[in-house]
Image (cartoon, coloured by chain):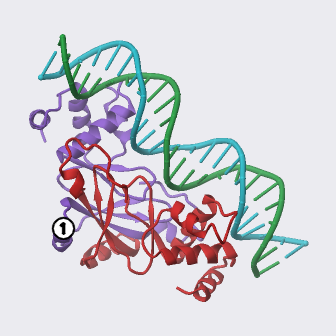
Chain colours: A purple, B red, C green, D cyan
Amino acid sequence: MTDRELEQSLRERGYRVTPQRVLIHRAFTDLGRHATAEEVLARVESQLPNASLPTVYAALELFEELGIAHRVAAGSPTALWDPRPQLHHHVICRSCGAVEDLDVSIDAARALRAARRQGFRAEGSELIVRGLCERCQTRRHGSHSCEPR
Amino acid sequence: MTDRELEQSLRERGYRVTPQRVLIHRAFTDLGRHATAEEVLARVESQLPNASLPTVYAALELFEELGIAHRVAAGSPTALWDPRPQLHHHVICRSCGAVEDLDVSIDAARALRAARRQGFRAEGSELIVRGLCERCQTRRHGSHSCEPR
DNA sequence: CTTTTTGCAAATGATTTGCATTAAC
DNA sequence: GTTAATGCAAATCATTTGCAAAAAG
């Protein structure tokens, strides 16, 4: 999504266009991969020296409302944020919390239909596979020492 | 899972059998549905007056390691815990955080295979559908007032 | 000008940790 | 007896909130 499209999307819903929102959005999509709010802040800090975590969170939540981002990879200590549209699936290690991408497409049509039947406006779906990452399989009683993410 | 099976499972892996673990497990499975750690504590308090949240967390995490429970429904402020084996899927409202069950089966075989190909020992999968719950669809700009869960 | 957004500091709230005590084995 | 588990209090840490100052429309 270009700056132009972002601006339009913001105005359409009555939100103001601010340099913070534009720059955070750019940093966020430039990162490309899922990122924590801290990582987004780090990435944007050079252009926005006074940016704060609350502002980043506010922007990310707003992007979620615009449908161009979402919280992802639940269960890990820190939420990860994903730029759309390639909503992808994840594996999460239950021992160390490591998160890895899963590049497969799954057929969630029935689930989405069921959600709508319950009155829910479904916007996307994410599959989370839980288990043990390679490193934690060899460890006993989960000494948590994998690199998070 | 019966008390007997739990005891066996604990001993098999070198964990001790304690009344706390047995009672927390019983309370947890009696609840049946996904529950927060607080709810499990509340449920077990009459039989374990001195039980504390850390003990409940420790037990739930241990159950997860035994494969009889898991953290679920990421993205909501508070983690929910599910008793196995009926791992089910969820809808989560991005505005108010409400979580609802989704009783459909989805074919995650390809995803599980992909996870194993990456060296991950996959133990189960959960689909999370994100969007807006019925009540939040009618509200503008997400005033967060739905009943959580 | 009016209303939203920002930035800072402080609050919140779930989950963890440290450690002395107690209970399993 | 040894070692692991409990219980309590205190710490952690991501995320929110309150509010005055600044910026957008």
For the point 68% across and 65% down, which residue is it? B49
For the point 42% across and 59% down, which residue is it? A75
Q: Is residue A24 above or below residue C21?
A: above
Residue B105 location (% of width, % of height): 26, 79
Q: Which of the pair A21/B31 is nearer the observer? A: B31
Residue B115 falls in image quadrant: bottom left
**Amino acid beneath label 1:** Leu
Residue B53 location (% of width, % of height): 60, 59
Q: Which of the pair A102/A11 is nearer the observer? A: A11
Label 1 CA crowd tier, 10 Å (few <14, some 14–19, many 20+)? many
- The residue singled out by tag 1 in the image is A112
Disc 1, SS: helix
Residue A119 location (% of width, % of height): 19, 63
Residue D22 falls in image quadrant: top left
- Is residue A49 visible to the viewer in this orientation of the structure? no
Q: Is residue A117 above or below residue C1?
A: below
Q: Is residue B45 above or below residue D19?
A: below
Q: Which of the pair B24/B112 is nearer the observer? A: B24
Query: What is the residue that sits farthest to the front in this orientation?
Result: B46
Q: Could you tell me which quadrant the C terminus of chain B lies in?
A: bottom left
For the point 20% across and 61% down, which residue is it? A120
For the point 63% across and 66% down, which residue is it? B45
Residue B63 location (% of width, % of height): 54, 73
Q: Is residue A109 above or below residue A66?
A: below
Residue B2 falls in image quadrant: bottom right
- Is residue A64 visible to the viewer in this orientation of the structure? yes
Please count the marks in the image: 1
Query: Could you tell me which chain the residue with mark 1 belongs to?
Result: A
